[in-house]
Amino acid sequence: MPESPSIPYWHLWCDDEGISHQTQCALTDWEFKGVGDAAPQWNDKLIHADSTVVFTVQPVGWVGEWHENPAPQWIVVLSGRWWIEAMDGTRIEQGPGEFSLGEDQGCAADPSRKKGHRSGTIGDQPAVLMTVQLHVPPKHSPCHFT
């Protein structure tokens, strides 16, 4: 059997004081199993929940000032590049094939009116994203999907 994979992702989450952070996590709970008659492959089933899939195209130069994600959501970059900045100052950049978990619901505005995160496009191409919004309450701890 091949070695179990570890796939990194960023988790934007809100602590108990209402401050958002970004933590590097990894998907590690894999099962080597076939689907139907297909040969075995690695599968990591994270959660069974109602969800909404949303595709977004953020224009060149787009900036989303301080806001929270509308729901806990997986965000997958399909093309282009974008950045995400947490309230603690952590800023990450992502490109095609990279993904994150946006779970910053319930943050508290700080004195400078920061709440949740900021995000925006990088470069001369729009950022095309696919989000899978989960209809579940957020958890206020990092890497709980490992």
Image (cartoon, helix red, strand yellow):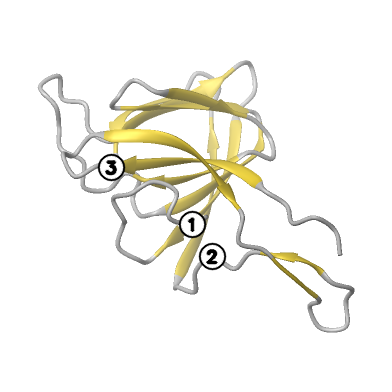
Along the line of sight, the residue nearer the viewer: 115 or 45: 45
**Residue 121 picture location, percent across and down:** 52, 24
Q: Which residue is mark 1?
A: 145
> Do the residues bearing badges 1 and 2 touch, measured as CB atoms within 8 Å?
yes
Question: Which residue is at a point 48% across and 57% down the rendered structure image?
Answer: 145
10 Å neighbourhood of mark 2: few (<14), some, or many (≥20)?
few
Along the line of sight, the residue nearer the viewer: 73 or 15: 15
How many marks do you count on the picture? 3
**Residue 104 picture location, percent across and down:** 31, 44
10 Å neighbourhood of mark 3: few (<14), some, or many (≥20)?
many
Please identify the quarter of the rendering in which residue 33 is found. Answer: bottom right
Q: Amino acid at mark 1?
A: Phe
Question: Which residue is at a point 49% across and 74% down the rendered structure image?
Answer: 48
Q: Is residue 35 left or right of residue 9?
A: right
Q: Is residue 33 left or right of residue 82?
A: right
Residue ranking furthest to the left: 111
10 Å neighbourhood of mark 1: few (<14), some, or many (≥20)?
some
Q: Secondary structure at mark 1?
A: loop
As drawn, the label of residue 14 is: 3
Q: Which residue is mark 2?
A: 46
